[in-house]
Amino acid sequence: MKNVNNIESLYLEECLKIRQEKLRRTLDLVENDRFANDNLKRISQLSLFYSSLQILIIKYSYGINKEELKGDIDNVIDYFDRFWSGDKTKVFDGRDRLELNQYRLEPHIYLVWALSIAVLLDVEETKFNKLVFKISEDGVKDKVLNFLSSYYSKNYNAKLIEGYEKYFEIPRMYLRLKNIIDNNSKEECEKLIREYLKKDWYNSYKKFNGWYNSHLLSPEKLSFAGYWAFEIAAVVKLKGLDDSKFRDNEYYPKDMLPYEV
C-alpha cells in the first residue's frame, strides 16, 4: 500500500510517531490555553484537524484496515467540528482583507480529503453532516465539495455556479475531476479516471507545498503521509463506477473500496 517504492515501514512508523507526539503536545497547549495570543491559539486548534487527518492517512499507508480507521475519522471530524473557522481557512483579499467565499489551498485540500475518507468509511450521517454544515456556514460554493457533501442528501447541484472571484488555483486543480463528476456516461468516467490517475493526478498537486515530493524529506519535516487519491475513490463510490481498469494504480486507495461497486 505504500505508494512510493522506496518508502520503508520504519520510515512510516517514525512519521506516525512524530506526528502523534506533535498532536499530543498541541492538544495539551490547547486544553490548558497556553498561548501568547488568540491568533496563535486558533492556528494551533486548526492544526489538530490537519494532524489527525495526516495520522489517519499514514495509518492507511501503513496497512491499517478500514474498520480500525473509523475511530480515527471520528477524531478528525471532532477536531474539525470544534476548531474549523472561516477566518482561518477562507481567502481574505487586499489591505482591507475582503472576505471571499472560497477556501485557501491547504484547508480546501484537507477538507476534500476528509469528506472523501468519510464517504469511503461510511461515516454515520450525523457525523458526516458536521463537515457539510461548516461548508454551508462558510458560504463556499465549490462543485467538488458539493458533490462529496451529497453522500446522504443526494442533492448535488450540477448547475452550481462556483464562488471563485480571485485566485483560481483550486478550480484549475480540480477541473478534470469536476468534468468526471458531471459526466453521465459511466464508461467515459472510468476511462477519464484511468487517464487522470496515470498522467495527471499527482502533478495536479504540485503547488501544494510540503506535500508534493514529501517522501524525499526526513520524517521530522512532518510532510509525508502517503499519496492517495481519496477524492477519486469517493467519486467512484458515489457514481457506482467499475474501478477494475485502474484499481492497481499506485495512487488509487483500492483497500478503501474492497468490493465491486
Image: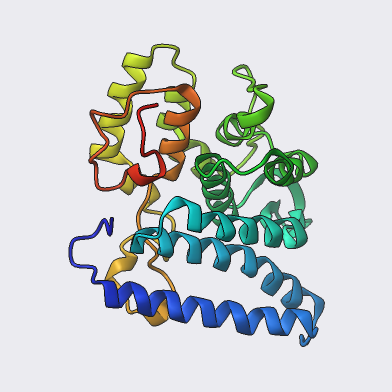
Residue 22 seen in render: yes
| Residue appearing at x 49%, y 61% in the figure | 56
Rendering quarter of residue 38: bottom right
Q: Position of residue 77 (x, y in %)?
A: 66, 55
Residue 212 vs 194, above or below: the answer is below
Q: Is residue 43 above or below residue 171?
A: below
Near-viewer residue (222 or 254): 254
253 on left or right of 195: right
Q: Residue at x 70, y 55 (%)?
A: 94
Residue 209 at least partly seen? no
Above or below, 126 relative to 245: below
- Quadrant including the N terminus: bottom left
Name the foreground residue: 260 vs 220. 260
Q: Position of residue 55 (x, y in %)?
A: 49, 66
Q: Using the rendered view, name the quadrant where residue 42 is placed.
A: bottom right
Q: Is residue 236 above or below residue 167?
A: above
Q: Residue furthest top?
A: 185
Image colouring: rainbow
Task: Say left or right for 2 vs 82.
Answer: left
